[in-house]
Image (cartoon, rainbow, N blue to C red):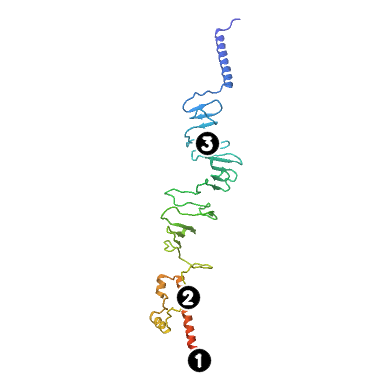
Amino acid sequence: MKCNPAYSKSFIALERVFVIFLLSFALSLNVQAQWQNGTNIYNTNSGNVGIGTSSPAYKLDVLGTWAFRNDGYFYSTAYAYDAVYDQYFHFRATGGKGYLGMNSTNSLVLQSNGGFVGIGIVNPLHPFHFNAASGQRSRFQFSNTTVDLVDYGSNAEGFSNSAGLFVAGKDALFMSSQGYNMRFVTNESGTFVERMRITPNGNVGIGVTNPTSKLEVNGTIKTKEVNVTAAGWADYVFKPDYDLMSLAALESYILENGHLPNVPSEREVLENGVNLLEMNVKLLEKVEELTLHIIQLKKEFEEHKAIQNK
């Protein structure tokens, strides 16, 4: 039986194609991709891929700067975030922590249990726990010429309900900028009102924006006790060499000036106020002078009474 020559040629061609297909399939099962070394990407056939390094030590080892563009995304074990609007790092570790650090130091810790964040500490105990290294000062520094307010402890409406600032230790609060006031402001019905300020020279004003004394208060002060340190007292009145003004001279002074000697007038008090310590000394001086006059009058009365009884 003779075969059609055209049919025989077609069969042979089909047979060759089939053999090539089988060889390709077999090679694909046993041969790994070989990447030629260059300046950008390396494959060591060990499962590690290097970009910019010929000896990658990790599944993906990048030596150089890398970036996420706005049309890309970062993919983790269970989450992928589109980066058109925002870019994210997501650490998926149930009950564990995520670390960001440099030089084998966990500088930033993200703890999944409670959402705590720690800087300089591997086991943060609060929603934000900051710990400086030994020999360094723990401080926050805000450096922005366009922002003059740090919003602390605000709720959804922008006002704080129960936020507090707790500082433990020495030198708890200080102003490092030279020539500026430290102002304390509260919120009254949606309006910020300054309640107290400390000036650069250490004067404290309550209800006063330019205090000229160490403590200046525009308002009422209520206290249980005031202890004033005095440099002297009015007991000099009882010394033998004290020049006690006679009652006649005292009467003449009062008629002429309208107030006791060595006591400020009403006009002086209205213009300059009263120094409480000095005024207490002056009032005690007058009480002691009055006591001496009473003693003198009693002696004169006793002498006059003795003469009358003779």
Query: For residue 203, which numbered disc appears in the image?
Result: none
Task: Give the distance between the C-alpha atoms of the residues marked 1 and 3, in whole angstroms.
Answer: 115 Å
Give whichever of discs 2 and 1 has the lower sequence position.
2
Image position of 267 (left or right of 95):
left
Residue type at numbered disc 3: Phe
Query: For residue 235, which numbered disc appears in the image?
Result: 2
Residue beneath the point at 45% across and 56% down? 182
Query: Which residue bears the numbered disc 1?
Result: 306
* Residue sitting nearer the eye, 277 or 21: 277
Mark 1 crowd level (few <14, some 14–19, many ≥20, 10 Å Cα): few
Q: Are marks 1 and 3 in contact (CB under 8 Å)?
A: no
Query: For residue 74, which numbered disc appears in the image?
Result: 3
Give whichever of discs 1 and 3 has the lower sequence position.
3
Against 25, residue 211 (above or below) is below
Image position of 224 (left or right of 266):
right
Q: Quadrant of residue 3?
A: top right
